[in-house]
Image (cartoon, rainbow, N blue to C red):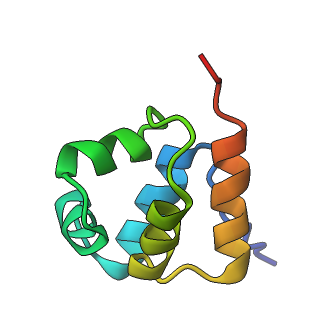
Amino acid sequence: MSVTIAPTAPDTLREFLMACRDRISVSQERVAIEVGVSGRHYGALERGQVRNPNPVLLTRVAEVLRMSEAEQERMRCLLSALPTA
């Protein structure tokens, strides 16, 4: 009997956002354009280098990446776990 093990949820913001992008097959640059920020800024967000991101930005990212409510909550949790300095 074989057992299928579900993949683990991404542990980092980077892994999480990359998984969301991969699910809908878009690049960082495409997300940045759709969100209305530079590719550099979105890349920094994905790497966890943006401290206290604007809530409007996060809402747009969630919309573009077609996140469920649970995924949006996961994104907020991962953001809050980032070091503050």
Q: Quadrant of the N terminus?
A: bottom right
Quarter of the image where one finds residue 79: top right
Q: Nearer the viewer, residue 83 or 24?
A: 83
From the viewer's perspective, is residue 14 above or below residue 26? above
Q: At which x and y percent is residue 59? A: 52, 71
Residue 32, can we see it?
yes
Q: Position of residue 26 (x, y in %)?
A: 25, 72
Which residue is painted at 53% across and 35% down in the image?
51
Seen in the picture, residue 65 relative to 76 is either above or below; the reply is below
Image-based side of 52 in relation to 43, left or right: right
The residue positioned 76% from the left and 75% from the top of the image is 2
Q: Position of residue 46 (x, y in %)?
A: 41, 47
The residue furthest top is: 85
Give me the residue at 64% from left, 23% from top.
84
The residue drawn where x is 49% and y is 37% is: 48
Q: Is residue 6 visible?
A: no
Number of numbered discs visible in the structure rendering: 0
**Vertically, is 53 above or below 85?**
below
Q: Nearer the viewer, residue 8 or 3?
A: 8
Counting from the top left corner in percent of width and height, residue 34 is at 25, 74
For the C terminus, the quadrant is: top right
Indicate left or right for 34 with 17 as reference: left
Corner quadrant of residue 9 = bottom right
